[in-house]
Image (tube, rainbow, N blue to C red):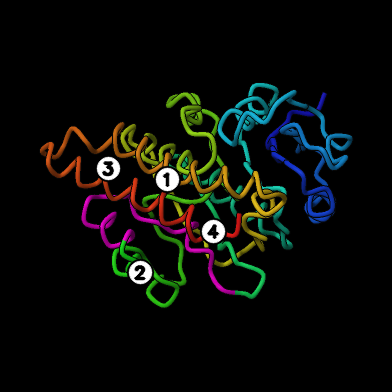
Amino acid sequence: MTKISLSIIILSYNVKQKLLDCLASIPKHPDWEVLVVDNASTDGSDKLAHITSKTNIGFAAGNNLGIRRTKGEYILLLNSDTIVYSKTIETVLEYMQTHPDVGVATCRVELPDGTLDYSCHRKFPDPVGSFLHLIGLKQISSYTNQKIPNSIHEIDALTGAFALIRREAGEQVNWLDEDYFFNGEDIDFCYKLKEAGWKVMYIPNVKITHHKLSSVKSSPASRKRWVTDSTNAMRIFYSKHLSQKYPFFVNWTVYLGIWLLRVARLLTSNL
């Protein structure tokens, strides 16, 4: 019986054609397995799934559902709206196999226009960075495309669109926190890994294309859910990991800013 070295989990929600394109872009390997988890799609993409949920249980819970069925020593979380290029998975996997102190790694993640999806190369939030983000100056507190070295290096956090995880590391931190529905769980996961002594690595010499937020754009209800979940994720992360480090007046200022951002997004989004 062939030993499974890599399990690829693709969580899908109402992006049937993009899911088909994603599956077609993944190289075939005898010791890899691909598991599609469907989050209660209504566009027929559930027919392509190996695992289906009766309701949309979110990104963290949906991926955890798939992880429980995997056999690989390594787990790749791959968004259904991505395209994988030649040698991308193989390169990141080989790096993981030769660097036992790495808990999770990612590649360069590009948007369809070729620009960097900044979510693949992030710093952990803090009150100053959160404030700058809220007033529209997030580039000051985050790495920008121009400042990112074009070489392999350690980062704070990556995106769940492409996250290649060592099973040992994932099990140690109990995988993705299901308190997050959509957004924030990838930063939370990296934060827990760092606290446990694992490295998070960025490997820019290989890439994927990410048609970002395709599931969110599938319906007005999905767009409205994204607005609420994205700001809820900020509140949850801050409460779990940062609030204990700052006085109450700083915390309440941050929570107020998050609430104001949610209101602003609801007012300006095309829902």
Which element is circle 3 on? Answer: helix
Q: Nearer the N terminus, badge 3 or badge 4?
A: 3
Pointer 4 residue: 269
On the image, which quarter does residue 194 sit in? top left
Q: Nearer the N terminus, badge 3 or badge 2?
A: 2
Number of other residues with Cα within 10 Å of mark 4, as a class: few under 14, some 14 to 19, many 20 or more? few
Q: Nearer the viewer, mark 3 or mark 4?
A: 4
Which element is circle 4 on? Answer: loop
In the rendered view of the protein, which quadrant contains the N terminus? top right
Pointer 2 residue: 139
Residue kind at label 3, given as amino acid type: Tyr
Percent of width and height locating residue 135: 31, 64
For marks 3 and 4, give the CA distance: 21 Å
For marks 2 and 4, give the CA distance: 21 Å
Residue sitting at x 34%, y 32%: 196
Marking on residue 162: none
Marking on residue 255: 3
For marks 1 and 4, give the CA distance: 14 Å
User: Compared to 264, does 246 lie above or below?
Assistant: above
User: How many dots with numbers?
Assistant: 4
Name the one closer to the observer, 9 or 262.
262
Residue kind at label 4, given as amino acid type: Ser
